[in-house]
Image: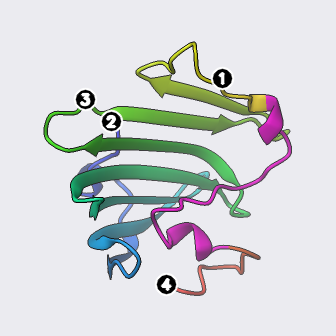
């Protein structure tokens, strides 16, 4: 996972928040940073799902108009599991590219990047952060 360490970044955080889960038992740390190309949210979620501890690390890069440029998510379920990563990148004409580690099981339905064509943002169901920039104002209204 390449979620950057905020202390090592030249950009200082605009805002950092800590959320307590309502639907899931857990907590989330999230920071918003200004970048030359736009904005970046990054965070860590620690939760319990069906009595299993879950770790989620994420980074969402946004353009200056709050459209998604890239998403990286790493999950780990319990101490025995191997981390799983999902990377989404978006071209200027809204074509999405999908990468997974480990690769999906070939027997399962495969990712369909074309089904995502034209979308401009993501909704991280495990975090309220992606609900904070719908109909984006000049700056995040909930921060």
Q: Is residue 77 magenta?
A: no
Provide residue 105's location: percent of width, then percent of height: 50, 17
Q: Are marks 2 and 4 in contact (CB under 8 Å)?
A: no
Which badge, 2 or 4, comes first in the chain's sequence? Answer: 2
By secondary structure, the bulk of the magenta-drawn segment is best described as loop
In the rendered image, which quarter is residue 14 located in?
A: bottom left
The residue that appears at 55% across and 26% down in the rendered structure is 99
Q: Secondary structure at mark 3?
A: loop
Q: CA distance from mark 1 to mark 2?
A: 22 Å
The residue lying toward the viewer, choosing from 121 and 108, is 108
> In the rendered view, does 4 fall on the left or right side of 143?
left
* Residue located beneath label 1 in the image: 110
Label ID, residue 143: 4
Q: Local crowd at mark 3 within 10 Å, few (<14), some, or many (≥20)?
A: few
Q: Secondary structure at mark 1?
A: loop
The residue lying toward the viewer, choosing from 85 and 79, is 79
- Which mark's residue is nearer the viewer, 4 or 1? 1
Res 46 visible: no
> In the rendered view, does 30 fall on the left or right side of 97?
left
- Report the span colored magenta: 114-133
Q: Local crowd at mark 1 within 10 Å, few (<14), some, or many (≥20)?
A: few
Up-down relation of residue 17 to residue 50 (above or below): below
- Which mark's residue is nearer the viewer, 1 or 2? 1
Which badge, 3 or 4, comes first in the chain's sequence? Answer: 3
Label ID, residue 82: 3
């Amino acid at each position: 996972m390449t979620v950057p360490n905020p202390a090592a970044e030249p950009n200082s955080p605009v805002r950092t928040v800590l959320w307590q889960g309502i639907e899931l038992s857990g907590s989330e740390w999230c920071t918003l940073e200004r970048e030359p190309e736009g904005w970046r949210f990054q965070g860590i979620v620690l939760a319990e799902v069906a009595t299993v501890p879950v770790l989620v690390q994420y980074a969402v890069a946004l353009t200056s108009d709050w459209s998604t440029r890239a998403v990286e998510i790493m999950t780990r379920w319990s101490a025995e599991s191997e981390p799983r990563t999902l990377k989404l990148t978006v071209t200027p004409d809204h074509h999405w590219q999908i990468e997974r580690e480990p690769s999906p099981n070939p027997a399962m339905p495969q990712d369909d990047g074309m089904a995502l064509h034209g979308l401009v943002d993501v909704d991280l169901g495990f975090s309220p952060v992606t609900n904070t920039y719908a109909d984006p104002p000049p700056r995040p209204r909930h921060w």
